Amino acid sequence: MQAQDAETPAADAPATPAESTATTEPAADAAPISAEVSAETQEAVDAAVDALLNAKTGAAEGAAETPEAADAALDATSGVADVIETASNAVSSQMVFLLGLGLLALFIYYFATETARRKRIVGSILTVFVGALCVWLYSTVGMKEGIELQGGVSMEIRIIPNPGQEVSEAAQQQAIQVLEGRLNKLGTGEVILAPSGEDGIFLQMPGVGEETLKEIEETLEQVARLEFSILHPQSMGLASRVAGGADVVPGYEALPYKESFDDDGNKLPTRYGLVKIKRDMEGEYVNKAGYFYGQSGHSISVDLTGDGAKIMGPLSAENIKQPMAIIMDDVILSSPVIQDVLTSQFSITGDFSQDEALQLASALENPLKNPIEIEYSNFITPTMGQATVNQGIYAGVAGLALTLLFILIYYRFAGILALIGLCLSIAIIFGAMSLFQFTLTLPGIAGIILTIGVAIDANVLIYERLREELAAGKSLKPAIDTAYEKAFSAIIDANITTLITAIILYAVAAGTVKGFAITLIIGIFATLFCSLLVTRVCFSWGLELNLVRKLSFMNLVPDQVIDFLGKRKICLIASIVALVASLIIVPSMDPRGVELKGGDSLTIQTTDGLTKENINESLADLDLGGTPLVQVQRPVGAPGEFFLIRSPDNTAQQIEAEIEKDLGVELKDTTVSSVGSAVGKSMLISSGIALLIGIGAILIYVTIRFEFAFALGAIAALFHDLIVVAGITTLLGQEFTLITVGAFLTIAGYSINDTIVVFDRVREGLATKRGDVKDIMNYALNKTLARTLLTSVTTLITVIVLFLFGGPGLRNFALTLIVGVMIGTYSSIFIAAPIVLWWARRSGTNLRREVLDTEQSKIEAMGGPQQA
């Protein structure tokens, strides 16, 4: 049973009539609560207006001569601000909800209606409105940038051991995991956390300025020990006396309420409540905590464990109509009156801002076992210099422009429509990321590149189908309709398999992997919207207005039959050799960079004659076993700058000597410490679990949609691509960094997408054509060859430009993608399909029969005719 709390007045403050009726109600009784809140709101407004008028006209002479009257006037005045904020939030929430509901209704109506004219009009409204909304969101709200792009704050955190204990490695990892949960619970931001020494944590966050630094420090240092205690029956009169030492109540202690402030930011007098020294229930029974905006404003939902519910049930049953203090770190957050028996779910309400409620929910769900203290904080520059960032942006834009130009030349008029859909897809990605304030990181950029590739692939699939239908003699409109219908299943299956992986990565994985997953999820929905709706609406208008009478395409891939499966044995042998070699090379050469492996952290206080640029130049030719990361830091609240260099283990002295020799400076004031991997054990474990669950989900989905042999081929191709790419890039001397993680995730997405498209054509061939299975699979591989090569070429254009002109920050990423796209193209033809054929023959599976049975079951599920 979920209950909704409304906060009671302070235990030792006079209760207003409205406050005295505040209750802890079940969620099912939402209507009565709404009426109470409305009454409180009206009373607050009336009181505030009266107080303001009295102050202005002097009609209430002497009303403010007593502290009580002054406090009442102040409380009433601050109530106006609360009412305005509440009303504003309610209006914003309603606007967002209604807007989303309207778009969803239009989207459903578009696919439900059979009239071409209505489809055109509704589709046009959706296209224009979504595009305009996303452009407006990006231009007004803006998008957060990661530590590589905008800098932020760097902190050194020390873990305080519990009495009689030392800080263990487990305690260090637990603290890192908790802080990650507090600072980046949704995975929409970027937080770098790594072990530092035996009892420290190295932290970096992007976009943190002077204003938000204090809030973050408070969030970090909060132990978040949640407790519950029934207030003493005479708490209102005794609490202040006990707090001041004038009285003693055995078994009870006085605790302060959460600080409150007036509209001018002035702190109001501290209020106290009398709680049991031995609390009624500890916060260790909290299972989950989350933020929500309810009738009482910004609130926190709390979900207890089973054991916690067993304690809370009898406790609340025995204390109906009694106030219960909700305490965190010896501060009373609120003291609602219990009106019903509580079980496992309830809410904490109070005078919270949205940020306070979010931070509190995060802290409750992520309590620290050891207290921490922040030793120092420094503002830092981006890990990539502004020139490097600009270089990467220009190279990316240029590569994308070349890709779009190629599509335009190759498909001509249809290429213009693809261009419109692709531009809208990119706008949706940036608009959605702006709306939800997702942080754009380098792995996030990897997700965008994958999205662009998938969006291009969807258009290529449709257009290559259209080419076939036109070649078969169909007129333009039927050919367009048939092309979209036949490409639909391939587009949906390819995107759903990618979507399954992305959702699991977001739900289970941690750190930068979540950022990649979020970008990919948004991109998949944008791709489906633009490829299946926007371009089709454009075609419909073109036909209706006679703007297009015929279509012509270039054809760089000749229509011929190549016996791909005849070469399967030699290709499988070559792939096995490459796999074995990669499994030996990667662990023996250990290509992990500083971010993944950890190393030395060198601080240089001397700045005379030093810049970030000349330090990087000095270290460029130094063989350290990894590329050092150089950042400029500025102490919080103090003048001056210094440099932080993160490098592989035991290289700090070598770096100092090289800088002194090359730049002619003497480094007198330097400190060296050890910093662990930014990808901790918990992140590695969670990412590994996410990968395994994702593979299992893909196996199930592909088995249901196709057959187990196809699922086995898809997973084998995926593992082949990742392992071989890792081996090749290691041989080429590339480091594995956080952005390389994004590149490998991108390769996995390409691999699955590529393979599913080929399998869709194989399935169609088995269902519609006669002949040997091997011949049909060869036919399908040849029919999808143009699409496979075109998708690879368009992706490679962008990535090669990034590699050549994107600067050193993106070169490793681009090279990994180049190798990955080429290996992925190879595996979809020479690995996935041959494994399907091999398994079918080995297990005696009749692929044609299995595919026909699957198709028949779909028809029956839709209520169609049954075969005799």
Image: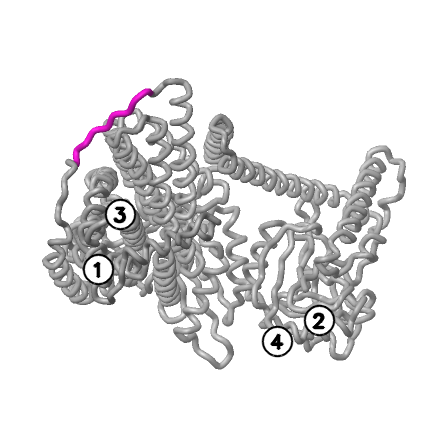
Q: Nearer the viewer, mark 4 or mark 3?
A: 3
Q: Quadrant of the C terminus?
A: bottom left
Structural distance between the alpha carbons of marks 1 and 3: 17 Å
Position of residue 133 measured from the top left corner of the image (x, y, whole percent): 50, 33
Nearer-N-terminus badge (2/4): 2
Structural distance between the alpha carbons of marks 2 and 4: 17 Å
Q: Which residues are magenta?
A: 549-557
Position of residue 23 measured from the top left corner of the image (x, y, whole percent): 77, 59
Nearer-N-terminus badge (4/3): 4
Question: Which label number is shown at residue 229?
Answer: 2
Q: Secondary structure at mark 4?
A: helix
Amino acid marked by disc 3: Gly
Q: Nearer the viewer, mark 2 or mark 4?
A: 4
> Which residue occupies 27% across, 36% down?
464
Q: Nearer the viewer, mark 2 or mark 3?
A: 3
Question: Which label number is shown at residue 765?
Answer: 3
Nearer-N-terminus badge (2/3): 2
Q: Secondary structure at mark 1?
A: helix
Question: Which label number is shown at residue 827?
Answer: none
Question: Which label number is shown at residue 307?
Answer: 4
> Circle 1 sits on which residue?
835
> Which residue occupies 38% across, 18% down?
546
Q: Residues within 10 Å of mark 4 (few under 14, many from 20)?
A: few
Q: Nearer the viewer, mark 1 or mark 2?
A: 1
